[in-house]
Amino acid sequence: MPYDVTIITVKPNTHAKALPPLEQWLRANPRKGEFLACLACEIGALNQILLLHHYAGEADLAADREAVAKDANPYGCLDLTVGRSADTFVQFPFLKPIRPGQYGPIFEVRTYLLKPNGLPPTIAAWEKAAPARQKLSPILAAMYSVTGEVTRFMHIWPYPDLITRANTRKTAIDTGVWPPPGGPDQLLRMQTDIYLPAAFSPIR
């Protein structure tokens, strides 16, 4: 089942101003997909707001995207918006569906571009290594893109704070638990951003 990842880029230093009208718009325009998260970037690609929805099928996702495209004030913050992207991602098959809940409040969003044939070996490497890694901290999402620039690989890691993140990553590397053997060989580009949940985000 597909996930919609919409990223709204707003004018510099206006994401806090954009969140209240965005919340009102989401409540007034319930989507066919399940609303999972609204995260605002705190470190990295600043002035970006990430929305995550889960869909039962492509038809509902397409209908929602068409409705947004025809909206006179999409997401309620058109006056602050300078860019927007919407892409479809699929969760790795060995991971559970993403569900609402308390996970963070720090969310590390890592977005990689894989080699053209890099997806199958990446899934295989992660499936083998993920159980040991998840003993250190949970994986919220590990998804690959099927639209836009392909193949992108987005994984989301929740932490209680940045110190825990740094210590967990150090432990994983020092013990050889992570990264998955052979995983980095499939990468062409890497980006890491730290996001915080909006007050109304189902995932927090």
Image (cartoon, helix red, strand yellow):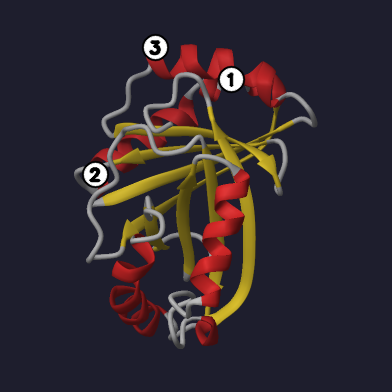
Q: Earlier in the sequence, mark 1 or mark 2?
A: 1
Q: Residues within 10 Å of mark 3 (few under 14, many from 20)?
A: few
Query: Residue 180 at what x, y percent from top left?
Result: 43, 79
Query: Residue 150 at what x, y percent from top left?
Result: 49, 69
Tell me: residue 27, above or below residue 171: above
Residue 136 relative to residue 163: left or right: left
Q: Nearer the viewer, mark 2 or mark 3?
A: 3
Residue 38 relative to residue 45: left or right: left
* Residue placed most toward the observer, 148 or 194: 194
Q: Is residue 147 visible?
A: yes
Q: CA distance from mark 1 to mark 2?
A: 28 Å
- Secondary structure type for disc 1: helix
Residue 85 relative to residue 103: left or right: right
Could you tell me the amino acid type at mark 2? Ala
Query: Residue 65 at what x, y percent from top left?
Result: 40, 37
Label 1 sits on residue: 19
Label 2 sits on residue: 59
